[in-house]
Amino acid sequence: MMNSLGRLVVAAVFAALSLPLHGQDWPTKQVTVLVPFAAGGTVDIVARLLGQRLGADLGQTFIVDNRGGAGGTIATTAAARATPDGHTLLFHHMGLVFNAALHDKLPYDTQKDLVPVAYLGATPNVLVVNNNLPIRSVQEFLAAARAKPGSINFGSGGVGSAGHLPMELLRSITQVDMVHVPYKGSGPAIADLLAGQIQTMLLTIPAVMPYIAAGSLRPLATSGKRRSPALANLPTLAESGVEGFDYSPWYGVFAPSGTPPAVVTRIHAAINKVLEDPEINRKLASQGLEVQALGREEFVRIVNADLAKWAQIIRRLNIKAD
């Protein structure tokens, strides 16, 4: 006859077997993909492309919810406060770590309230000038800025934006006097750059490739550690004499803190499987994204390292969000 301890052990085993295998049964309902920018931008395009494929692979609908505004903090707040069950995800880029240092107080804690789930890749930017300027290299650009301090205006999508901060870093490293002209979004800034109202911008490759091809804007250098395959003949800023300059903003997927580890692992694996598809790679490359499937621990390390790096840079340059 089984004693009471034996009956308890058997009951515990059957109870464990009757529980759902968390992670293996994800997703069990529609997944909301939060995007902190308006439709049509790179993050939105990447989210829709991956969401559509994930939905087909996993048999559930992935709905993209664009919640733009406040530099991305509206969507990020919604993600941080969502039910942590894997059915709300945040697609974001490196602007997430900028916001942590730009704002004295956020309605969420970047490290405590969000879990890095999957690294998607990175995209170096390209420094371009209006084609009317007689400048054809970074050294000529810096020489012109030094010859007439304050004569070169650079635009961005706003204070603290992905187009603003790396230009401030460039200005700090090279000790040149340029004037920042913030816009409400990169679209109006590009329009003024084409019209010659401002002289230069640092932009994502997809955003300016049509203008480069048409001869409307002249590329001087890319911003990453290595040359971009999209502009293989163009040197990097570091190669052009701006020693140590490396800016390749990453794109990634996050979940609310408290999401079960097994579910996080399942999401990570599902996304990396999609990234392995050559056709998906080709489509993401058309957005200037250099795809790289990393382990989740490596993505966590990258996020934490960039939080520390950009907090130091932003404090040193004394930049605050509007």
Image: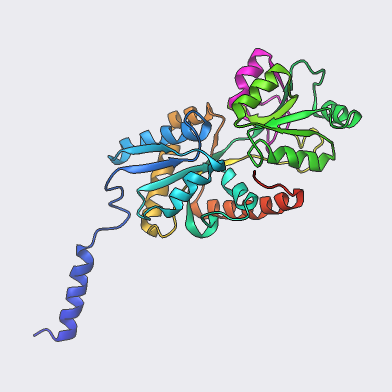
Q: Is residue 145 visible to the viewer in this orientation of the structure?
A: yes
Query: Taking 317 as reference, is 283 left or right?
Result: left
Q: Nearer the viewer, residue 176 or 160?
A: 160
Q: Residue 297's x, y, as percent? A: 52, 55
Check the image and report above or below for 84 versus 70. Answer: below
Query: Is residue 187 covered in magenta?
Result: no
Q: Residue 145's x, y, as percent? A: 85, 30
Q: Is residue 251 visible to the viewer in this orientation of the structure?
A: no
Q: Residue 12's x, y, as percent? A: 21, 73
Residue at x 35%, y 48% (from the top left corner): 87
Check the image and report above or below for 208 versus 61. Answer: above
Task: Give, as a single range, the part of the protein colored magenta.
Answer: 207-236
Quadrant of the rendered structure where residue 273 is? top left
Residue at x 41%, y 60% (from the top left corner): 258
Residue at x 42%, y 54% (from the top left corner): 81
Check the image and report above or below for 231 versus 270. Answer: above
Quadrant where the C terminus lies?
top right
Check the image and report above or below for 260 versus 134. Answer: below
Quadrant of the rendered structure where residue 157 is? top right
Q: Residue furthest left?
A: 1
